[in-house]
Image: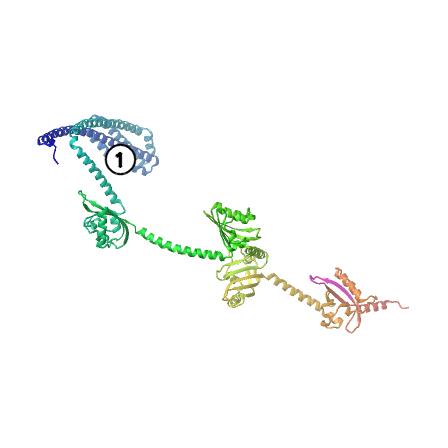
Amino acid sequence: MNMPRLFTRRNIIIGILVTACIIIFLAYYTFLGFTMSMDQARRENRSLQSLKALEGIMDNMQDIETGQRGYIISHDSLFLLPYKESLQKLQSDTSHVLEIIRDFPERTAEYRKLLNYVNDKVVHAITTVAQVRQGEYELASQSTRSGFGRQIMDSIRSIIFRLEQEDRSILYESGAKRQANARSSFRFLLLISLLLLTGLIWLVWKLLREEKTRRNNEKQIRYLARLTEQSSDAIFSTDKKGIILSWNKGAENIFGYTAEEAIGKFAPAITRSGRTDEESRQIAAEVNSTGSLTKESLVYSKEGREIYCLGSVTQLTNEQDEPAGVVVILRDITERKLNEKLLSQFNAELTDQVRGKTEMIRSIVERIRDGFYSLNNKREFTYINDYAAEIMNSTVEKLSGKCIWDVLPEAVGSPAYDLIESGFRDLEPVEKDIFYEPFNNWYAITVYPSVSGVSVYFKNITNQKIAEEALIHSNERFDLISRTTNDAIWEWDLETEKLWGNDMHQLLYGLSPEDPVPHEEEWLARIHPEDREKMRLRQQTFLDSEKNVFISEYRFNSDNNGYRNIYDRCYIVRNQEGKAIRMLGSMLDLTEQKKAEAKIRESEALYRALLEHAVEALVVLDMATGKFISVSDSAVSLFKMSREELLKRNPADMSPLHQPDGSLSTEAAANWIAKSIAGEKPVFEWMHTDSEGSPFLCEVNLVRLPAEDRVLIRGSIVNINEKRKQNWHSKTAKKPEG
């Protein structure tokens, strides 16, 4: 390549000299500009130092005033913390102001005046704080209210404001001058540059073009370098021999080798891909022919962990466009490969399971005696089992493809219709028990919606509903009985230890229905000490036996009424092995009954004593049998018959055929008995006969006895033969002798 004539020695020397002159001129111009800039910088620096010192003094004075006032008002020493800290800082700031005075001789008077005000304010603050510490609160408050401190602060703020305004003006003017100098310099340099460019553009055109290309390349290289370093993929480069030249962070994270460990090493030794020489040569040949290659590989980390990678190998060339090496990008796809493997296995297993489940479900659906069918969005049957078709009085073949509401027009508007249509409308599963009047049956219907239609499962629960209704009535009856009965009903689950008792059971213990049901220990503790051990052993004996019924009587201590006589009837529920698992029973309070029975026995004994020792003959006649059912000892003596003989007789058997007045004994007796049955208490004379047939006159008193289920007549019989004889003799003795 021949150099143009422009590049002669003379022209080169001239160019060098011209360039040197230009450089000297530019250096001088730059020196002048630099000198001016330094001067401006010094002025700006002085103004900035002044502003900083003034702002520091202002901040410290405000903190001192705030701490002073807060301490004077609240007497809280916490306000003195910023106060003391600001006093310390103020010394540094005032020293800084004294140093600045040298740079601003024209402001000496202002600065001195400012420092005097600061000193006065500090003295005033220290004085008032000291007064508060000494307990002179009123004096400190008067000093604060006098306004002296506020006047000083106003003077300080005024001076600082003026000085800050001057400093800001200096900074503004300096900035303006700097901008003007910069514009002048820019115009001058622009002119020089244009002149130079005009003269030298034909020399540097190619250089500028190459420079632009170089810069673009460098920018792209820097971008690629950052991208490479920040990438999570492993990116490294090798020379033609496979020696690693670069190693990014992604490669460090994947393989576990640092860049220092990997660079300079043979790449296959680091990645441990396990490729044979033949495979490596084939890969190199393909890269050389196509320039790049993408391939999945199995490599190993430093710890020996298997890593599945998707690798991209791209050829690198030198300036002569000759192969210089390769760049390798490896993306870790281990998790994806494992997921693919698991997904493949899962899909295979799922397919087998779905196939098997589908066949099983189809078989189950066909066998179950419940209805199942599927409808598309047109309400047409897409599937129906035999039982459902049978319920609808049809067959699967006839119903397939038919609209359900055409098959069952009577169902339109019914609860079943609303339920199925809600599945289409709301796309949410719904289930409900419905009485379908056309079939006169209850059905449990479940609707499973999908985007393509609904599936309906229904089951005839008529018998279940009848049983539930019967159970409800049974539970209501049991609840009513348990509430209304006087028995204390209880239940004990021997396996779960759960207990239940009705209201009377709780009342027997002195508890409310809401209180916990007492346990076995409480029951035993309330049994009379004389009965307790016997009851415990008796209960355990029955539990260990095969018997189911356990009846006992014992005395039980009730909170309200002391010991009560309890008649406890238990039924033991046993499992298949005969083990007792539950006990149910009722505790009947027999105390009042026992007392009544005792009174009855006492009354009977008393009545028997009266009956047996009565002077008159007493008999009780049962009108249902017409026989005596009770006779006294005096009646036995009166009629000269044994008790057994008398109990076989009736009044007519011990009377003559006619009474003294000529009336039949049977008719007269029936008349007197009828009066006593009517509620009268007749007293009359009656002729009786004894076992020997001897007649005797008696006075009879009849009374009806109280009895619920029969008519009983008590007769009181007194022999008045002797009385009549005595009366006759008495009358005879009184007659006058004629």
Q: Is residue 38 visible?
A: yes
Q: Residue most toward the bottom?
A: 692
403 left or right, relative to 64:
right
Is residue 676 part of the magenta span, yes or no? Answer: no
Q: Residue at x 22, y 41 (%)?
A: 221
Position in image of residue 265 (x %, y %): 19, 51
Mark 1, Cα crowd under 10 Å, few <14 / some 14-19 / many 20+, is: some
Q: Position of residue 300 (x, y in %)?
A: 26, 53
Indicate the colouring scheme: rainbow
Front residue of 686 and 184: 184
Can you say which quadrant of the picture contains the C terminus?
A: bottom right
Residue placed at 54% from the left, 60% from the top?
Answer: 490
Tag 1: amino acid: Leu
Q: Is residue 252 left or right of residue 7?
A: right
* Label 1 secondary element: helix
Residue 574: image location, x then y, percent: 51, 64
Q: Is residue 101 above or below residue 678?
A: above
User: Which segment is the magenta one?
Assistant: 699-710
Which residue is identified by label 1? Answer: 87
